[in-house]
Amino acid sequence: MSSTRRLDIHPMRAPDRAWAAGVMAASEPWLTLGRGRADALKLLRNRRKLCFIVRSGGARAGFLVLDLNGPLGGYIQTIGVAPEMRGRGIGTAALRWAEAHIFQKHRNVLLCVSSFNRGALRLYRRAGYAVVGRLRDYVIAGHAEILLRKTLGPLSRSTTQRTRRATEKTPRQKKSL
């Protein structure tokens, strides 16, 4: 990541949204999914999403869209890197930043990647994500959306502790066995 210089990640503003929508509309998986600039702008203007701009050396390098609402809570919806900035570790650094941001309040980070987006899938596997499911023919026929997860453990720590205590044998139980 030495060629990325210093990355700064901040909430998006209107000019950042326009730039990110252009990057999205011209990149995978959005090209294969048939999503254009208008679809990208709609996503980036959704107030329920957290949208961030990633800068390297002051220049726009990429963006993140997180969804911390709903049943999945810690969901990375989109990571994008400008074509001229790819291969410099920006996507990996943005992913790590998103994980740290999510893990402050959630026990799991989840994301989906299209089966045809092999480069992204490699990135997520290298970063320690495990495949937890496949939604075949979910968005487009002949492809799957692959659900990935990185976890700190179950949602409820107290449930884990109660379960562990219930399965541990007490000294009295051990003697009688």
Image (spheres, grey):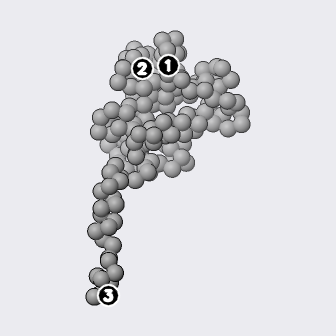
Residue displayed at 28% across by 88% down = 176
Nearest the eye: 70 or 169? 169
Can residue 3 be spotted in the picture?
yes
Q: Position of residue 109 (x, y in %)?
A: 42, 42
**Number of residue marks:** 3
The residue type indicated by label 2 comes to Leu
In the rendering, which numbered label is found on residue 106? none
Residue for badge 3: 175
Residue 129 position within the rendered picture, expressed as x and y whole percent measured from the top left: 47, 48
- At label 1, the amino acid type is Met
Query: Which residue, given by chain and number where applicable, does mark 2 sit on?
Result: 44
Q: Residue under circle 1?
A: 12
Q: Are marks 2 and 1 in contact (CB under 8 Å)?
A: yes
Whichever of callouts 3 and 2 sits on the residue coming sooner in the sequence is: 2
- The kind of residue tagged 3 is Lys
Residue at mark 3 to residue at mark 2: CA–CA distance: 62 Å
Label whose residue precedes the other's in the sequence (1 or 3)? 1
Query: Residue at coordinates 37% horizontally, 40% vertically from top-left?
Result: 145
Disc 2 packing (10 Å; few <14; some 14–19; many ≥20): many
**What x and y, as percent, mark residue 90?**
61, 33
